[in-house]
Image (tube, rainbow, N blue to C red):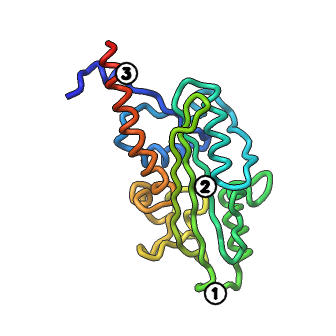
Amino acid sequence: MRSSKSKLNRQKIILATTNQGKFHELKKCLTGVPADFQSLADLGAREDVKEKGKNFLENARLKSLAWSRRSDFLILAEDSGLEVDALRGQPGIYSARYSGPRATNEKNICKVLRLMQGIPWPRRTARFVSWAVLSRKGRILKEGKGQVRGYIAFNKKGTQGFGYDPIFFYSPWKKTFGQVARAEKGKVSHRGRALKKIKAFLIKYLDAAQQENEKGA
């Protein structure tokens, strides 16, 4: 059994996002990891690192490494988005700003639904893709990828989640991601699957670090 002292030495992990919806979802997926989680907003950062990568993995690496060089904490960055087959993979890495410079979730959803008008159900296939990257002091420690397939609904359904969740229909549940609680979605979502690999690594990593600290105490 760990001493009460170990609880006071919990490491801090920065979830590299200023989006509070995403922060809470990331944190929920990492339930059970013995660490204290903070977002970039908690650190006073007003904006994230600019995404200049050509794909989700490049963007996640870029953000994770950039913030890890500015801090001594563990940094977890994640980049993800929606890929619609009928739209040739769009919006892809531009998911968050698909409707323009002043994009909002509502505007992005409306644009996808408008572009998908007249497309029959069998051709409305899509997928959410996520890459998560954990770094410390400019070195990548672990990467994880997650993906989930579904369909673009004809209309918005549900108010849960964020982003494109209300129009992403998940066949096994016969519901959109916007119709299920965050905890349930995390069990099958792209983000949940990517973070499952990061979570397993973190538990071992933090346990090893704690044992080292106790030896030196």
Relative horizontal placement of residue 82, taking residue 208 as reference (left or right): right
Q: What residue would you read off at disc 2? A: 80
Three-letter amino acid code of the residue under disc 2: Ser
Q: Which residue: 63% across, 43% down? A: 61
The label number, if any, that marks residue 207 in the structure image: none
Residue 117 horizontal side relative to residue 1, left or right: right
- The crowding category of the residue bearing disc 2, from other C-alpha atoms within 10 Å (few below 14, some 14 to 19, many at least 20), is many
Mark 1 packing: few (<14 Cα in 10 Å), some, or many (20+)? Answer: few
Which residue lies at the image location 67% right of the left edge and 60% below the top edge? 106
Can you give x and y, in whole percent of width and height, for residue 67 in the image?
Answer: 63, 32
Q: Earlier in the sequence, mark 1 or mark 3?
A: 3
**Mark 1 → mark 2, Cα distance in angstroms:** 26 Å
Which of the image's four quarters has the C terminus? top left
Which amino acid, by three-letter code, is at mark 1? Pro
Res. 16 in view: yes
Q: Which residue is mark 3?
A: 9
Q: Quadrant of the N terminus?
A: top left
Alpha-carbon distance for marks 1 and 3? 55 Å
State the CA–CA distance, disc 2 to disc 3.
32 Å
Label 2 secondary element: strand
Task: Give the x, y percent position of residue 48.
Answer: 68, 38
Residue 166 picture quarter? bottom right
- Residue 104 shows in this picture: no
Mark 2 or mark 3, earlier in chain: 3
Residue ID for mark 1: 120
Q: Are marks 1 and 3 in contact (CB under 8 Å)?
A: no
